[in-house]
Amino acid sequence: MESLDQIDRDILALLQADGRVTGAEVGRRVGLSQPAASARIQRLEKNGVITGYRAAVNPAALGLNIRAVIRLRTTHAQLSRALDFAGQTPEVTSTLRVTGEDCLIFDVHCPQAGRLEEVVDAFARYGPVTTSLVLRAYPPKPLTDATSPTTDP
């Protein structure tokens, strides 16, 4: 894929903030016609830069009032079993394989502390776990911000 220009980056930022924004509105905001904006969006999709559109759901509205991060240190022999378990556990909303002392990091949403305890204990079958409660989550930054040059204040 050729490098992204500023208009592509602006389009990505708009779509990450609101995946339901229309092609006409994207065009208006970035200074393109609707067909030109739609063509750029389609190119970004075709080239795998945009991989999908999703609804952001408030876990608390579903009764999932406890959020935790579970870090697992496991062995190579247990890794696939731990990943399989995570895939079958509805409370696990994301999984990261990482370097360092820990092997996997799980984002977990539970309705109450007792269920979190069960999930933590189940992961402990695969190795030592460290659990941290999430006090607050901040909105993610658009990925285009990470690729833009920044200056120190």
Image (tube, helix red, strand yellow):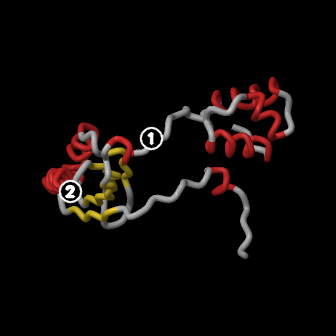
Crowding at dot 1, Cα within 10 Å, few <14 / some 14-19 / many 20+, comes out as few
Query: How many numbered dots are placed on residues in this image?
Result: 2
Place residue 39 in its image quadrant. Answer: top right
The residue wearing badge 1 is 57
Which amino acid is tagged 1? Answer: Val
Secondary-structure class at tag 2? helix
Q: Position of residue 32 (x, y in %)?
A: 85, 33
Q: Position of residue 102 (x, y in %)?
A: 30, 62
Seen from the viewer's position, the closer of residues 27 and 86 is 27
Quick check: 139 left or right of 63?
Answer: right
Quick check: can you spot residue 3?
Answer: no
> Would you place residue 50 above or below residue 135 in this image?
above
Q: Quadrant of the N terminus?
A: top right
Label 1's element? Answer: loop
Circle nearer the N terminus (2, 1): 1
Residue to which mark 2 is pinned:
113
How far, Cα to Cα, is label 2 from label 1?
A: 21 Å
Residue 126 vertical position relative to residue 37 in the rendered view, above or below: below
Q: Name the residue furthest bottom.
A: 153
Three-letter amino acid code at the position of disc 2: Ala
